[in-house]
Image (tube, grey):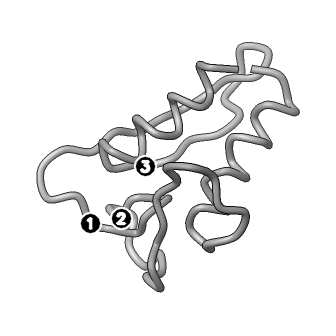
Amino acid sequence: MCGWCARWLAQLAADARSGEGRLFGQPGANGRHLVFDDQCAVCCESPAERAERVAWEREEQAAGELFLCVPCARWLLGLATSG
């Protein structure tokens, strides 16, 4: 993933968490805040069953990583793979 796309993907997660720049189907934190490492980086819920650690690379080096619940991972990865 190029640097521009890596920043875009990280910004999508931050925007969803803050409630800014609403996209269709975008999850939201609904006033919740990130406090613990086991909370979803987008919706700030603590996943009850499954979660995913999503990482992306830039020029074969780690460029970013997010801990996401399954619905938020599907949303974010759906956007990333559709473009």
Q: On the picture, is 81 further left or further right than 35?
A: right
Q: Circle 3 — which element?
A: strand
Q: Are marks 1 and 2 in contact (CB under 8 Å)?
A: yes
Residue at 18 percent of width and 44 percent of height: 50
Q: Earlier in the sequence, mark 1 or mark 3?
A: 1
SS at mark 2 in the image: loop
Per the image, the residue denoted by label 3 is: 67
Dot 1, how many residues are within 10 Å of its Cα: few (below 14), some (14-19), or many (20+)? some
Q: CA distance from mark 2 to mark 3?
A: 7 Å
User: Is tag 2's residue or tag 3's residue first in the polypeptide sequence?
Assistant: 2
For residue 76, above or below residue 28: above
Label 2 neighbourhood size at 10 Å, few (<14), some (14-19), many (20+)?
Answer: some
Query: In the picture shown, does residue 83 fall above or below 40?
Result: above
**2 and 3 marks in contact (CB < 8 Å):** yes
Badge number at residue 39? 2
For the residue labelled by badge 1, is the local secondary structure a helix, a strand or a loop?
loop
Q: Is 23 placed above or below 33 here?
A: above
Residue 31 rendering spot, x and y as whole percentages? 47, 85
Q: Position of residue 43 (x, y in %)?
A: 43, 64
Count of marks overlaid on the render: 3
Q: CA distance from mark 1 to mark 2?
A: 4 Å
Q: Residue furthest right?
A: 4
Kindly identify the amino acid type of the residue bearing the numbered disc 3: Phe
What's the residue at 32%, 61% (across, down)? 38
Q: Which residue appears at 86% of the width and 30% of the height?
A: 3
Amino acid type at circle 1 is Ser
Identify the residue under disc 1: 46
Q: Residue 1, position in %: x, y?
A: 74, 20
